[in-house]
Image (tube, rainbow, N blue to C red):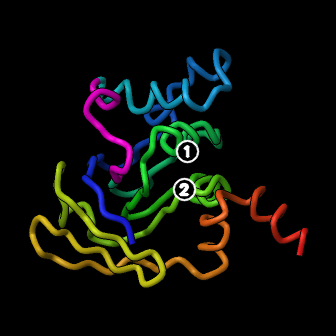
Amino acid sequence: MIKGKVWKFGDDVNTDVIYPGKYLSITADPVEMAKHSFETVHPNFIKEAKPGDIVVGGKFFGCGSSREQAVTCLKHFGIKAIIAESFARIYYRNAINLGLPILVCKGISSKVNQGDIVDIEFETGKIKNTTTGEELQATPLPAFIMEIINTGGLIPYLRQTAKK
């Protein structure tokens, strides 16, 4: 289980908003990438957000391009999870492949506010807004996906399982 402060975003948050395309050719350093997370829609995100926080989105979070940098920047910033009403399929897959927990939770947008504190149990999909006391049910992550996330992503998972 993890606990964190919510950073709330709306519907159709695209990969250019998460990690601006103008930085794609400038850096491959994930720590440097993290410094540009959400800068076009929330310029103070880097100064105000803290490692361990949680991003909450509306519908179709991560739409746009297939760039992995839009996951990499959040993971290396220290975001512990992303919860949204729905995700672009490639963004969802990129998050799992890179080891960033991601949950689909219908109704999350209307049940949490910026700054709320939430507890998340990935295996059961239970989310508790500890600020309001409200409990929500997300789609739980299957055991094999939790294994991928817990080993840091698909590549570390494959390396680990290849040794067995």
Magenta-colored span: 44-54
Q: Report helix, strand or loop for mark 1.
A: helix
Find residue 15 and report its horizontal and vertical position in percent. Answer: 51, 38
Q: Residue at x 51, y 47 (%)?
A: 63
Q: Residue at x 20, y 60 (%)?
A: 117
Q: Amino acid at mark 2?
A: Leu
Q: How many angstroms separate mark 1 from mark 2 (CA)?
A: 8 Å
Find residue 114 and report its horizontal and vertical position in percent. Answer: 18, 49
Left or right: 143, with 7 as reference point: right
| Mark number displayed over residue 100 | 2
Q: Report helix, strand or loop for mark 2.
A: loop
In the rendered image, residue 30 lying in the magenta stretch gets the answer: no
| 99 shown above or below 37 | below
Where the C terminus falls, by quadrant? Answer: bottom right
Find residue 108 and report its horizontal and vertical position in percent. Answer: 27, 66
Looking at this view, name the residue that lies furthest to the right: 163
Label 1, on which residue? 71
Q: Residue at x 31, y 63 (%)?
A: 3
* Crowdedness near tag 1: few (<14), some (14–19) or many (≥20) residues, C-alpha within 10 Å: many
Which quadrant of the structure image shows residue 144?
Answer: bottom right
Q: Residue at x 64, y 20 (%)?
A: 27
* Crowdedness near tag 2: few (<14), some (14–19) or many (≥20) residues, C-alpha within 10 Å: many
In the rendered image, residue 52 lying in the magenta stretch gets the answer: yes
Q: Amino acid at mark 1?
A: Val
Left or right: 33, with 110 as reference point: right
Looking at this view, name the residue that lies furthest to the front: 163
Closer to viewer: mark 1 or mark 2: 2
Where the N terminus falls, by quadrant? Answer: bottom left
Which quadrant of the structure image shows residue 103?
Answer: bottom left
Q: Earlier in the sequence, mark 1 or mark 2?
A: 1
